Every structure is written in structure tokens, then in C-alpha cells.
Image (cartoon, grey):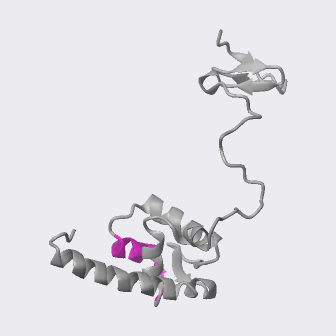
Amino acid sequence: MIAQALDAGGTGGRIVGSVVVGAEVRNPKWDTDPGVSMAAKDDGAAPAFHCPVEATLDAIGGKWKVVILFWLKDQTLRFSELRRKIPGVSERVLTQQLRELEADGIVRREVYPEVPPKVEYSLTPYGHTLRPVTEAMCAWGEKHLRRATRRGQAR
């Protein structure tokens, strides 16, 4: 029976739609043992990669990260400028991708104390080390577009 129960901590609060099992609270909708999880554990250790390409893709993989790097390669841009240059990305996804690049030390975010707030994005020195990668991708992309156009497959 699913019952409303007092929380296991004894604070007298109510947990609606959950049951107390021993000293732990479980949600019957996802009745799993909290000690067993299929989710990846973040133990603080560096992720194990099987090849250097995996490490590269971990840092710059995804649909928009390399496009962001392309636009920041020679210039500093505000968020709205990046949005205009990358029309297919949502604000939420662009924000997420920029945060991940910033967390990896690839992109620098500078906030100016103004009203309205001014935020600019640029590549860090470490981010500039990816320039040969983005240039190689651009060169390959141009060749691929020419080939696809000749074959009548341009998108």
C-alpha cells in the first residue's frame, strides 16, 4: 500500500506518495534500492578513456561546441551575438554548452558590472590550442560540401 508517511528523519514533515522502508524513504514509482544504481558515479576521479579521441570528444563533442569555438576563434562575442551567429541553437542549450566549455577551461566568460549586465565570451589560451582542430574540421567540411554538391546531395 502506498501511504503518506512521516519522513525518516523524524522532523514531522510529510512526504506525499512515498513510503518509509527502514530508515530510508523510497518513491514507489521508482522503487529501487538506493544502494544500487545504473547511473555513472562521479567519484571525482578523471574519466577513463580508451583513446585520445574520446578525451577530445568529451571536451568539445556535441552539436554546438565546435560551432561556438569556430565563432570565438578570432573574436570576443556577447551571448546575443553568438545566438545570432548560431540560429539553430536554443538559449538554454547555448548557455549549457558555454558553461561546459568554461568549466573545461576552454572559454572565458567575462561579466561587466553594468545595467543591463554585459557578458562576453572568448577563448582562453587553452581554448586557442584547439584552433588546429577547428581549422582541420573547417577544411574537411568545405571539401565535404563540394563533394556533396557535385553528387547532388547538398543539404
Quadrant of the snapshot with the N terminus = top right
Give the image location of residue 127, x and y in percent.
58, 83
Q: Residue at x 72, y 22 (%)?
A: 14
Magenta stretch: includes residue 64: no
Give the image location of residue 11, x and y in percent.
82, 26
Residue, far top = 1
Q: Which residue is drawn at 53% across and 76% down?
A: 119
Quadrant of the snapshot with the C terminus = bottom left
Give the image location of residue 137, x and y in percent.
41, 81
Image: 22 above or below 45: above
Image: 109 above or below 45: below
Left or right of residue 86, residue 148 in this image? left
Q: Which residue is drawn at 67% across and 12% down?
A: 3
Q: Which of 114 and 92 is in front in this view?
A: 92
- For the record, the magenta segment spans 75-86
Give the image location of residue 58, x and y in percent.
58, 66
Left or right of residue 44, residue 59 in this image? left
